[in-house]
Image (cartoon, helix red, strand yellow):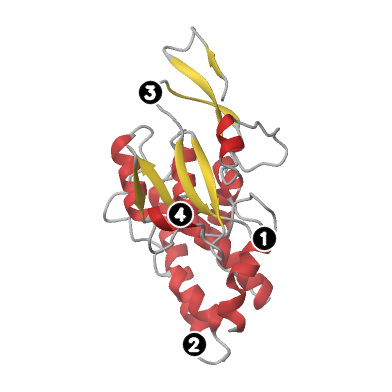
Amino acid sequence: MSTINFHPSVSLTTTIKHLACNFKKPRILTNLTKTQPHLKPRFRNFTVSMATTPFEVCVKASYTIPNKLGDCPFTQRVLLTLEEKHLPYEMKFIDLQAKPEWFLKISPEGKVPLIKFDEKWVADSDVITQSLEEKFPVPPLATPPEKASVGSKIFPTFVGFLKSKDPADGTEQALLSELSVFSDYLKENGPFINGKEVSAADLALGPKLYHLEIALGHYKKWSVPDSLPDVKSYMKAIFSKDSFINTRALTEDVIQGWRSKVEG
């Protein structure tokens, strides 16, 4: 059972051991992990409301290390939201190459992420993050509607360039064009999409830029050019956040995850 320490000086809050993907932290085995070996939480300290109990989240498992978070950017978006809102959670690692029967019963399409809200499993990162914002509005992460789609075309153009086998097909230029538009936006509105503070749009875009950096660096020896310093600074700021470090995939898992799309 997780340890709960009461601190009278902090008005009716408790310190709960919180999940984090960090090998430097000691592993605490709960009764749940003994009875459900697919559930392997890691913990760190932080303060949350007494009413909050850990959310169960089905996530993609690592290709390379057992019981380690895999390379899904949509799952990382959900975990980032939980982290930024200081909500405790426990991950259920799903091998998507050999999906267990219990998982297919709650997710017939076999997709992650999946989170349990009030004994009901909910899918789709858009739906999940919106629900978290509605249920736990503090700290606020909502991005104003007029800014919510900023940078949204970067990911599909990245995928097009990554899969391309023709250097002259214009896919690289399409990606550079979208990155340039994003750079211009950051110059006027940054450092983040909604200004000075990270918002939901950053938590959606950040994991995709992480995949972009690793996959293009490995498969095409390509990186965001120095002529786009605002984009490079944005990526550095997002990637260096504790919440991102706690939820990011291993480099080798990102590489493996894109291999079939590149070599297929």
Quadrant placement of the C terminus:
bottom right
List the residue tagged with mark 2: 170
For disc 2, the neighbor class at 10 Å (few under 14, some 14 to 19, many from 20) is: few
Of label 1 and label 3, which has the lower sequence position? 3
Q: Are marks 2 and 3 in contact (CB under 8 Å)?
A: no
Of label 1 and label 4, which has the lower sequence position? 4
Task: Calculate the distance from the C-alpha at mark 1 to the C-alpha at mark 4.
Answer: 26 Å
- The percent position of residue 150, horizontal first and vertical second, equals 37, 61
Circle 2 — which element?
loop
Instruction: State the mark number for residue 51.
Output: 3
Task: Calculate the distance from the C-alpha at mark 3 to the C-alpha at mark 4.
Answer: 27 Å
Circle 4 — which element?
helix
Instruction: State the mark number for residue 251.
Output: 1
Task: Calculate the distance from the C-alpha at mark 1 to the C-alpha at mark 3.
Answer: 36 Å
Identify which residue is drawn at 50% across, 75% down. 159
Circle 1 — which element?
helix
Residue kind at label 1, given as amino acid type: Thr
Of label 1 and label 2, which has the lower sequence position? 2
List the residue tagged with mark 4: 103
Residue kind at label 4, given as amino acid type: Phe
- The percent position of residue 171, horizontal first and vertical second, equals 50, 83
Q: Are marks 1 and 3 in contact (CB under 8 Å)?
A: no
Q: Are marks 2 and 4 in contact (CB under 8 Å)?
A: no
Quadrant placement of the N terminus:
top right
Residue kind at label 2, given as amino acid type: Gly
In the displayed structure, 14 sits above or below 180; it is above
For disc 1, the neighbor class at 10 Å (few under 14, some 14 to 19, many from 20) is: some
